[in-house]
Structures are given as C-alpha cells and as structure tokens.
Image (cartoon, coloured by chain):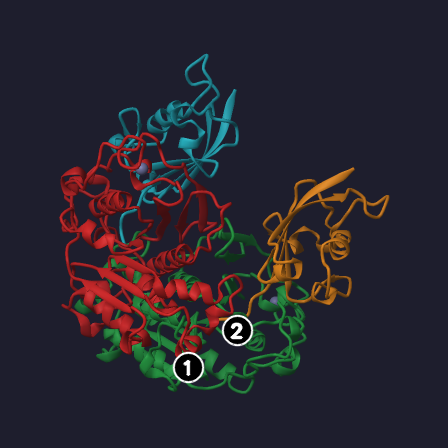
Chain colours: A orange, B cyan, C red, D green
Amino acid sequence: MSLKVKLSFSGGMELLFNNNKSAEVKIPASINPPNPTNMQDLIFWIRDNLLKERPGLFISENTVRPGILVLINETDWELEGELDYEIKDGDDIVFISTLHGG
Amino acid sequence: MSLKVKLSFSGGMELLFNNNKSAEVKIPASINPPNPTNMQDLIFWIRDNLLKERPGLFISENTVRPGILVLINETDWELEGELDYEIKDGDDIVFISTLHGG
Amino acid sequence: TGSQQLSLPEYLRYGRQLILPGFGLPAQLKLRSVSILIVGAGGLGAPAAMYLAAAGVGHLGIVDYDNVETSNLQRQVIHSEFRQGLSKAYSAKMSVERYSHRFLTPDKDVNHMCIAYNILLDSSNALKIIKAYDIIVDATDNVATRYLLNDACVITGKPLVSGSALRMDGQLTVYNYKNGPCYRCLFPKPPPPETVVNCSDGGVLGAVTGVIGSLQALLAIKIAVGMDDPSEPHNLLIFSANSYPPFRSIKLRGRKKECAICGDNPTIKELQDYVQFCGSGALDKSPETMLL
Amino acid sequence: TGSQQLSLPEYLRYGRQLILPGFGLPAQLKLRSVSILIVGAGGLGAPAAMYLAAAGVGHLGIVDYDNVETSNLQRQVIHSEFRQGLSKAYSAKMSVERYSHRFLTPDKDVNHMCIAYNILLDSSNALKIIKAYDIIVDATDNVATRYLLNDACVITGKPLVSGSALRMDGQLTVYNYKNGPCYRCLFPKPPPPETVVNCSDGGVLGAVTGVIGSLQALLAIKIAVGMDDPSEPHNLLIFSANSYPPFRSIKLRGRKKECAICGDNPTIKELQDYVQFCGSGALDKSPETMLL
Ligand SMILES: [Zn+2]
Ligand SMILES: [Zn+2]
C-alpha cells in the first residue's frame, strides 16, 4: 500500500530540488514495518529519493536542519507531533527555508 | 434534511448583514420540493432570513445585483452553473461587492 | 530603441534583479523597453509608480486630473506636504525622477521617460493615450473610468492590471490577458450608483493601498518580462486586513463568448458615454446615498 | 502626552481613517501617542516607515547603520539618487518629514517626532533603544540582528513585527505577542551560515519588499490601535510571487514552555553575542558559500 503526498519547497528550499517548487509523490504506507510511515521516515525518504546532493543543507541530527519550518496541511508541524506525525494519504507537506533578507 | 453552508460577505456586503463577515447556516436540502436547493433558492433564503432591510442592495431581477461577485468554494460561480448550482453540504459561499476605490 | 546591452550604471543599479533566478539581463532589457501607463496617481498609483520606476521600466505614463490635497497624504506617499495644490500626475513624475537616475541623465541611446498627463481620461482621449503603451495599470477610484479603461484595453488589445482598495479591503486581477475575462465579462452591468462607495466617503487605510499598489507593480513586471506561470488560472486576489486568512485567491471564468465587448460578436465597437452608463462619473466625489 | 483631541489640520489630514468603521477618533489618538521603532531602512523599512508616518504615528524611530548605495535604489524607494552616501536612517527621516506636516510644524502639546539612529544595533545598545518604543518592526537583513531583536523584545516585553524578503518570496509574522511564539520558539538554533542568503547575494524584486513592508506597517497599526481579531490564530504569512496561490497563511505553535528565552524557565536572561551565535553578523555582506 502506498500514500500519495504533496510536497512543496519554498523560501529557497526548491534550489536543493532542481528548482522544483512542488512534487506529488507516492511513498510506502509503512517505510519501517510494522510502523506506519511518519515524518521522520518521510524526511529520510526525501533525502534518499529526491535530494541529489548536499544532504547537510536539508537534514541535520536526524531532523530538518535549523532554519527550516515544516508545515503539515497549512499548520506548523509542532502542533501535529513533529517527527512522530503519521503521514496520511493526501497530506500537503511544505518545507520552508526562513528568509532573513530585507 | 438540511445542509450546513458557510456564508461570507466581503468588500462591504457585510454592512448589509449587521457587519457580520461570515455565518454558518442550516438550510433545507429542498427549499422548493422536489427540487434540490440551488443558488437561486439560497439567494432568496438569505434575503428572507438574514437580510433585514434594503433587499435592492442585494437582489435585482431575481439574482444578485450588478457589482456582486459570487464564489462557490473559492471559484467564480459562473464556472459552477450560477443560479442552477445545487448546494452541497459543507459548501463555502462568498458574496463580494467589487471595490472601485484607489 | 536602444542597445541590447546595459551600461555600467545600469548594472550597478539593477544588480539585485539581474541575479534573480529566471530574471537576468534579458528581463532587465525588457523592462527598459516596455511602456506602462498608470491611470491614477492616488493610493494605488503611488506605490505602483514608485516600484515600476525603481525596477527600471523605461517608459512610464502617469494620468491624473486631480491636485494634491491634505487628505491624500495619509496614503498617497508619492506626494508631499510641499506639493499641495500641484497636479498629482506632475507630483508623481517629480518623485519618480527623484530616485531614478535614468530619467535625470537620460542615455541618448535609450528611450527613457516619464510623462505626466494632467487630464481627465474620457472617451475622447483614452484610445489615443492607451495605444502608446504596452501595459495599463488601473489605479483609478471610480466605476465609470474602470469601464472606460476596460473597453479601451479590449479595443487596443492591452492587458489591464486592475487594483482597487476601500476601507481595509483590496482586490487585484488582470483583465483582457491570455484569453481571460475582461471587466465586462465579470460585470456586464454597472452597479447601482447608490451602492458605489469611493475612498473619500468610505475611508481607506494607506497601508492597504500600499499592499495592492505594490502587487500591481509586481504583476505588471511579470507580464512585461514574461514571468507568468502558464498553469496559473485566471484569478482574482481578495485582501481583507481584518479577516483571517487575509488573502484569498479565487479562480475566475475565462473570456465570455457573449461579452458585449470582448465576445465573439461584440456589440460595443467604440468607446461609450461611461458617465451615463454608470450613472456617475470620475468627478462625482460624493454620490447622494452611500451604503455599501 | 498631548491633548485627547485632534486639531483641525489633523482632522483634514486623517479624515479617510477617521471614517473607517471600527477606527475613528480613538484609534487616531492612539496612533498619535504610540511609538514605533523600525529596524532597517532598506527594502522593507522604506514602505513600513512611509505608511506608518503617513498614518499619523506620533513617534517613529528608524535604525540603520548603512549608507545609501546605487544598488539600493531598485527597491528602497524612500531614498533617492541625491542621497547616495548619506546615512540611510537620516535619508528615511528626511523623506518621512517631507510628507508629514506633523514633523515639520510640531504641535507643542503633542510629542511628534522622528528619530534617526545611525548606529549598528548590538547587545550593548539594543535594550536601551528598544525600551523607549511600544512596537518594534524587524526590517533587517541578517540572522544575527533577528535573534538580537527577538531577545531584546522578549526581555522588554515588546511585540516584534517581523518581515523578510528574498528573491520573489516574503514572510511575515508577529513574535512575542499575545502568548504567541518568539523567534527562538520557532528556531531555537540558528541556521548554518552557509545556508543563509541576503538580498545582496540572492537578489530581490522591489515590489516584493513593498508588499511585505506595507503589511508590516498594517500589522503595527492594528496592534497600536487594538484592531486585531481575537479569533485569529498565531500565524505566519508566506508570499511567493511566482506560486499560485501567491499567499498562504500558516497556523503557528504558541509560546513554548521550553523556550530558552520566553519559556517558563529561561536560560537566557540578557543579550548574547549574536555574531558568534549565528556564525555571521550584520556586517558580513557576503558569506563564503551561499546556496540557499
Ligand atoms: Zn469581456
Ligand atoms: Zn520563545
């Protein structure tokens, strides 16, 4: 079984993904059987399947690197359980690099 | 049976509705039996149940007066069948008065 | 006109745009050669003119028939205390020239200019002016002029970047562009005059006009350099400073076959009497009744 | 300070705000008595300062340590060609005074003023300056100053209206306000220096800074007059000029109990060395590597 997830990259994150601002992906419903796929699994899956180089600009200490905000269905992932959030079919997940310019 | 509908009023329309910018309402699933409730029915229902005065600023010739744009679930109602659109439970319907100032 | 290169001062001036992904030298050259007409030097026209001039638009036109008044200064940040009584179009031109090297020390090879039109745009003069520009920015404050600009843009085939603001709300869209609707496709009939409110009567917060006017400049730049996303639907942006979320994007109908001016069999082939059509005109600052 | 009435010139000047529903005389008096500090007189600070001054904010402070450069003029519309080499803080003050009657002919009863701070804000001076203001607008361009402002606002209990812009994107939120998060609640650790890009290196379109800076003025006004909607969640607005829809509002976490500065048991009780903390400072215009 697989889950369809919409991924978006913004604030410069897209430059790590060939300038793609979004991607519809299919991921296994259980990347680490028997556990359902969670955000932790998804982040590693993205590193292994979508990110081609410089993983340090995306991952640090087994989570997204400092300065990246993750949104799950238009909500700060901290309100949804962060790494433990279980991915659901149809989820809309955004990785935003915070901007500092003015 | 009844339908739950979210109504919003913007661009000054809210001034006709006691300055309420939105309302969750329950309307009959068939205002004109046996036909399912459509936008035409909803507009009259709003006039009779929510609008207290000056219906001419809302309705003209059995539809919304010129200068009001209607949105059904974030889409121009013209793409959805206008007056003939059949209301569904959970619909998000917006009445916007176009602005002309600058 | 003009060479296909930038001068050293231009490189220094526009460096922050030249390094933008998907922008670069070709886009900057397009901005230099484009002509944009801003109709209205008020709340919306002020930021629109400032950001278009700052970005390096080579040929700007600014139309306004009013003079600067005290009550404008709460939002029309292109004017100033010292300009009261002066034509708004000229005042805007003066401000634009103040921070635009190009207008002050024109390069003879490049056709840089800012023209102020201190006139009341109407059916007798609109086509002649609009024909001379590539993109039209509607920053006006009344219904009659909005229909006039729409019809003139359809007749001459120009995209119309339309913004409006009132109280804490704003709206933004592009008409007559890429087979999208014109103003008449959406609003075949004008609103009853008693439902129309202008900023003088309804009030408006300056920062709201700042948001919408800046977005008008941005849309005009995107059209000028061809940056727009082909997958973007025809849409209307709605802004309401005291709603959450404050911005909503609405998918709009396309061009209507039955439209009286842009349809397959148009019945309107020349400009009309828009004051009569709308029941009010550009100079009617306070209609008798105003409720909405 | 000042009377609880408006003068006739003030009524004429602010008429369009006085008639706004839910605004009126009380709100205008609040604007006159509020003090707002704008940190950064660049792309964001330009429209923020213009719209706050135009709206009638009685006491504005503008902090910037840079001088006006040619490459700023493509977006920083508060400066001009003639001001090159001049302090940005002073240049912004001059522009604000140009269209603000209040600053030019001060009413002795009313404490109207605009103060330019031509200084580099750091741990040694930030608290003293910030203490004197009611609302702080973060219009800076580097991570170290963003942490500095955050910590200073938490320590002094001031809301921080934070905007940022880069390329075609912008972000906007209010920190340390109504039990919402502070910058450290969201970002306890600074980003690796090699992932940080400023506008000099990444580029930015002026109209994007116009949109975000105008929205910063609007948020500061809403806070000053108490217009904010109690049902509005803590949120972050994301703007991307080449995405559809261009604006998204994101619901944010509240204040975090474990936050090192605004939490229940803060470990940070005074300002830090932010250049060391972030690995780069306000004056590092070009970090060695820049990818993001
Ligand atoms: Zn049409
Ligand atoms: Zn905190």
Q: Is residue B9 left or right of residue A94?
A: left
Q: Which residue is the site of mark 2?
A: D153
**Which quadrant would residue C108 be assigned to in this image?**
bottom left
Residue in view at x 39 percent, y 68 percent: D48
Disc 2 residue lies near ligand 2 with CB under 8 A? no
| Left or right of D38 on screen, residue C198 | left
Circle 2 chain: D
Position of residue D187 relative to residue B44, above or below, is: below
Query: Mark 2 belongs to which amino acid?
Result: Cys
Dot 1 alpha-carbon crowd within 10 angstroms: few under 14, some 14 to 19, many 20 or more: some
Image spot of residue A35 (x, y percent): 83, 45
Cα gap from disc 2 to disc 1, whole angstroms: 30 Å
Q: Position of residue C192 (x, y in %)?
A: 21, 37
Tag 1 secondary structure: loop
Residue in view at x 37 percent, y 36 percent: C255
- Which residue lies at the image location 49% right of the left edge and 53% below the top edge? D247
Horizontal side, residue B6 vs residue C166: left or right: right
Q: Which mark is residue D69?
A: 1
Q: Residue furthest right?
A: A34
Q: Residues within 10 Å of mark 2 (few under 14, many from 20)?
A: many
Q: Which chain contains the residue that carries disc 1?
A: D
Residue D215, image x, y percentages: 42, 61
Tags 2 and 1 on a common chain: yes
Q: Are marks 2 and 1 in contact (CB under 8 Å)?
A: no
Residue B23 in view here: yes
- Mark nearer the viewer, 2 or 1: 1
Residue A54 is marked as none
